[in-house]
Amino acid sequence: MTAIQVENLVKIYGSLRAVDGISFEVAKGEVFGMLGPNGAGKSTTTEMIEGLRKPDAGNIHVLGHDVLKNIEPIKQRIGIQLQTTSLFQKLTTRELVKLFASFFKNTLPIDEVIGLVNLEEKVNTASKDLSGGQRQRLAVAIALINDPDIIFLDEPTTGLDPQARRSMWDVVSNLQKRGKTVFLTTHYMEEAERLCDRVAVVDHGKIIALGKPQTLIHDNFHETALEFSDDERLPEQLLTSLPAVERVQNEDGITTLYSTGVARTTNALMALVEQQQTELRGFTIRAATLEDVFLKLTGRRIRD
Ligand SMILES: Nc1ncnc2c1ncn2[C@@H]1O[C@H](COP(=O)(O)OP(=O)(O)OP(=O)(O)O)[C@@H](O)[C@H]1O
């Protein structure tokens, strides 16, 4: 069964087509991500699905209901992570969750919701005294209070340090284990790769790639990246002529060899290093990432 179905969605602000004909479906129980740089149209798309903004064209169905005709039947069944929990700075975690619970007919027990986002130890802490990551998780708790089938998370980890980001990832994975559908937006590649069953890569209001992260990567890249720094700079000509090397790139003192045969390239590279009597620092072999996919499709990095 489809959780979300979006067809030819368009939103125009003045002369800007912020969302320019977007279509996709999200299955029940799926973690689906919209990945793209700032201004790509992710929030606008999300808010139209949530019923908070009216599209200029297109159709949206959530759990089989036409959102544009009547949002009421799905209000109880979706949860939205708000960005503004700092509004009630003096209220504690428990008080805030309780406050939002009062808006709904059916809710989960307050403590269960707080447990779902691992904030048990902070139930009596005022929201102003929570860390950024804890505050974001509190916002997720509030989104979960009505036990929704679909949870919308708009950039849930923006501005968080790596540890806080991992905690949020655990929360999202646990939601999926409980059978929830999660729709999230992000501009972090690693987040999309780790969390999402499928991602829509968006740029300038259009979907430029859609699929499982690993499929998108494999469809676009057959090479593996070998990276290292070499102080004395091995001559590029010699590197290019190593077996199985497709391309050589040098950026900020880091050399990247894109290879279709890691073992052959590595062996030959090591022989070359010995022959040239130099040394490699920080030699790593890494698979291509969604960042490489975005770069290949748009010619830009996502964090521009
Ligand atoms: N209410 C508005 N009026 C006019 N322009 C808007 C409005 N809301 C968004 N925009 C513009 O529409 C484009 C898409 O914005 P949107 O917030 O959807 O992007 P995004 O991908 O979510 O980016 P971000 O991660 O920065 O939020 C941007 O160029 C933005 O400036």
Image: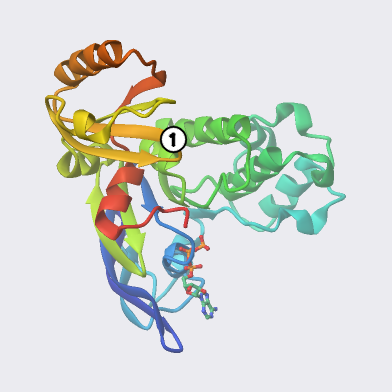
Q: Residue at x 67, y 43 (%)?
A: 138
Any part of residue 63 in sight: no
Q: Residue at x 44, y 70 (%)?
A: 48
Considering depth in this image, is 58 or 166 the residue closer to the camera?
A: 166
Locate residue 180 relative to residue 6 in the image: left or right.
right
Q: Give the colour scheme shown.
A: rainbow
Q: Residue 182, how many percent across, how many down?
A: 42, 46
Q: Is residue 223 above or below residue 281?
A: below
Considering depth in this image, is 286 or 41 the residue closer to the camera?
A: 286
Secondary structure of the residue carrying tag 1 is loop
Q: Quadrant of residue 228?
A: top left
| Crowd rating for badge 1 (residues with CA inside 10 Å; few <14, some 14–19, many 20+) | few
Q: Residue at x 33, y 12 (%)?
A: 277
Q: Residue 217, how many percent across, how many down?
A: 24, 40
User: Please, what is the three-letter code of the amino acid marked with disc 1?
Assistant: Gly
Q: Residue 257, how many percent across, how many down?
A: 26, 32
Any part of residue 147 in sight: yes
Q: Quadrant of residue 49?
A: bottom left
Considering depth in this image, is 237 or 99 the residue closer to the camera?
A: 237
Locate residue 118 relative to residue 253 in the image: left or right.
right
Task: Please give the residue where the numbered disc 1 appears in the rendered image.
Answer: 253
